[in-house]
Image: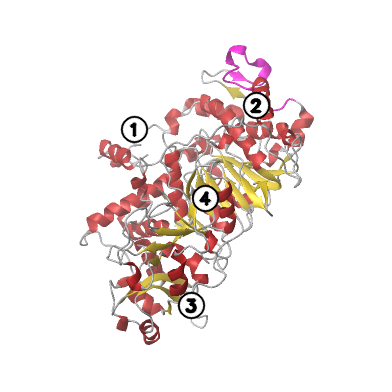
Amino acid sequence: MGKRSRQRQKNQTAGRDSRDNGWGAGYADIVKENKLFEHYYKEQGLVPDGEFEQFMEALREPLPATIRITGYKRYPDEQAWHTNMSRKIIRKSPLLEKFHQFLVSETESGNISRQEAVSMIPPLLLKIEPHHKILDMCAAPGSKTAQLIEMLHSDMDVPFPEGFVIANDVDNKRCYLLVHQAKRLNSPCIMVVNHDASCIPTLQIDSDGKKDILFYDRILCDVPCSGDGTMRKNIDVWKKWTTSNSLHLHGLQLRIAVRGVEQLAVGGRMVYSTCSLNPIEDEAVIAALLEKSEGALELADCSADLPGLKWMPGVTSWKLMTKEGQWFSDWSEVPSSRHTQIRPTMFPPKDPEKLASMHLERCMRILPHHQNTGGFFVAVLEKKSLMPWNKRYPKGNGQAEEAPKGASLTQEATAKQDGVCGPPPLKKMRLFGYKEDPFVFLTEDDPVFTTIQSFYDLSPGFPKLNVLTRTHEGKKRHLYMVSKELRNVLLNNSERMKVINTGVKVWSRNSDGEEFGCAFRLAQEGIYTLQPYIRSRIIRVSVEDIKVLLTQENPFLSKLEDDAHAQAKKLGMGSIVLKYIPNPNNPAEPQCPIQLCGWRGKTSIRAFVPRNERFHYLRMLGVEVFRDKQGLGQKRRDGDKEGKEEVADEVEKEEEGAAENEEDLDLENANENGSSEPKTDSGNQGTSS
């Protein structure tokens, strides 16, 4: 839901807050009752005996707000927190105004994510390591994608992990919500692409001078679903829920899962998840996938992986119900008139031995009343060998070629006849939605490097070939960096995939150009990626220096402490790195390094840091940054805060549909800190066009 539609809803429901019992505006008149839903889930027997009323009562209660602290920024291990308060209470209570501002600000600067507790489970079960190649098939709005990126960067001392995340979504607009989420983390190892997950293209990479197929070590398959596990936050589900939702989605879910395991490396792991409790979308998809795999896939036993999590084992029997209330227990009972809506794969396997060998009890269903969460389903699949339809096309590396077009189409036709999903037909890629600028990698001898190299004294190991821009013609406005492995993917697949965004911005052009010694100034979002290669233009600063730099608009050099002042006087005008190194002998000060982009002027010095990041560092140093609503110019700032809140809501609620346009998402801080700076060329402020 975009800003405008949200505002319309707010206007229509003004004055109802006193009657909405803790739910958000617009939900006052929705009765949290659905007899068909209750009847269906009582019959399925998914809830333990004697607990059904507790289950329903939990669904009627507001979902507690939960947050996750960004994992790679050297925070303690207790990284997820549960508040027992709904989002509305946090937003509306005057007593919680400071806490609310903290949440909005820290979310925007990437230090926390406001993410539902059960949504955090799939990435944890993937067991990601920094060298893994990861595909997130249905990634928007991106809270799980952010987790995947964090896991890649578990060692902050490695600017370019070997692994990467390719995050895909079929909805072009929702891809920009995904971009917004990913960009907060400033990683050079993330690429956002826009494809139908059920036929996402097979990518190629260069491997020792030869073309090879890209197989992923880890795949997150969080498929579109009916979402009845989200009733506590998506209140519309109460009135819209019907059994036909799952019947319509089952086939798509299975096709996406099949396409996922095709692209999984042998020995790799894929997590299939939904926010639905319905076996038609859950165990039925897993059972069909296992049956089709003929032993190539195995459900992993994850019972010991998340100690403390309460979950119900997957079920081995379930029934199917039409929206008219008619029940079917087996495909043989389904009249031919229903064969277009109901498929054989929606039922449990009939062979008891085959059913037992699948170990469906290893699936995990999280029920809302057990730990005050949303409802969720998750299954972890491990690939033991090639998928049977790929074995006819072996490659020397033990993986497989993409099946030839004729074979793929034949298998797809056969699959449609017998109700089992086969490999997708090869389709010509159709580009749609927003037109993206090209990705252009710089060469090692590009003249742009001449002054950059000398001005910043880049180390010999600086990977020039990883630098890219988004224009073929005219001046380069912004320079970005990607990891070597993502560069490999980009260069070999430009005709196969539609890339929405990749890379982290490291330099922006100054329109005043060479008079400062270099036409490009450092960008804060890329500083942690770039700084290990910079050997000059660095000023080591103290805690007190940082307080001055982040609270004063344009302080004189003399405002710095003696050591930093002496360093600054030795440097000419231009872009600088302000670097704080922790002192282990002074535990009262922050014990993590801080690196800020700055500008050394003629007589003054300043930090160029986005506002929310500024607030973050000041909080770390114990400086109060609460903004009084009565303050001068507060209207503009409140409006900005409201915009951030809507983006956070969009992500946290994981609604279908995205904001109405890119501006609604505030993809970039067009004015990084609300103050003047060396003029930069206008144009694209990020790698999203």
Tell me where residue 151 appears, x and y as whole percent. 58, 57
Tag 2's secondary structure?
helix
Magenta segment, which residues? 327-350
Horizontal and vertical percent for residue 94? 30, 56
Q: Which mark is residue 191?
A: 4
Local packing at callout 2 (Cα closer than 10 Å; few below 14, some 14-19, many 20+) is some
Residue beneath label 1, please?
29
Residue at the disc numbered 2: 409
Residue that mark 3 sits on: 581
Label 3 and label 2: CA atoms lie apart by: 60 Å
Query: At label 2, which amino acid type do we have?
Result: Leu
Visible residue check, residue 38: yes
Question: How many neighbours does mark 1 have within 10 angstroms: few (below 14), some (14-19), or many (20 or more)?
Answer: few
Residue type highlighted by circle 3:
Ile
Foreground of the two, 249 or 167: 167
**Distance Cα–Cα, label 3 vs label 4:** 31 Å
User: Of label 3 and label 2, which has the lower sequence position?
Assistant: 2
Mark 2 in CB contact with mark 1 (< 8 angstroms): no
